[in-house]
Image (spheres, grey):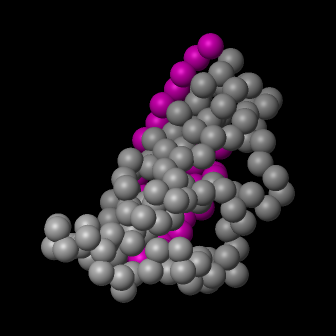
Amino acid sequence: MQVSTHQLTIQTEGVIDMHDITGEVQRTVQQSGCRNGLVTAFVRHTTAAIMIGEYEPGLIHDMPAYIERLAPAGVDYRHNQVNHDDNAHSHLAGSVIGPSETVPVVDGRLVLGTWQQIILVELDTHPRSREVVIQVVGE
């Protein structure tokens, strides 16, 4: 079994900025030489998330409203009071969506459905530089 690790840096614009990272994950799998195994994409931040979904204009448009219902920005959160901050809702949404996704690799290819992409979701209130660790484990 082999393990290959790659780091991807993405500049975001803040406030539910979404990035399709499927191509970069697939390139990492190919560069690793892995034929069969698993690949994980993990974002190293608590106000960002990784999800699998359909990366298309409708979803990109709908995501901010969904996240606002999930973790409203205008609530008087204790985190914001204690830390003199404005992003408690970003932390909460990140904890629900999650920091990673794992996808099987078969014959050197990601096993994703027709409409599935791996997406980085920026949840914070301002632009950020995000680090995504892509790790391939397999043979």
Q: Is residue 114 left or right of residue 6?
A: right
Q: Is residue 21 magenta?
A: yes
Q: Quadrant of the N terminus?
A: top right
Of 119 and 64, which appears nearest the observer?
64
Counting from the top left corner in percent of width and height, residue 136 is at 58, 30
Is residue 39 rendered to the left or right of residue 7?
right
Q: Residue at x 47, y 74 (%)?
A: 71
* Above-or-below relation of 11 to 56: above
Q: Is residue 20 above or below residue 108?
A: below
Residue at the (72%, 66%) spot, across then down: 54
Give the residue at the far right of this rendering: 114
Q: Quadrant of residue 108?
A: top right
Q: Nearer the viewer, residue 85 or 55?
A: 85
Start-end of magenta stretch:
1-27
Report the residue that reaches farthest toward the top. Answer: 1
Image quadrant where residue 86 sits: bottom left
Q: Position of residue 32 (x, y in %)?
A: 59, 28
User: Who's the residue at 44% across and 80% down the image?
Assistant: 72
Residue drawn 33% across the image and 60% down it: 129
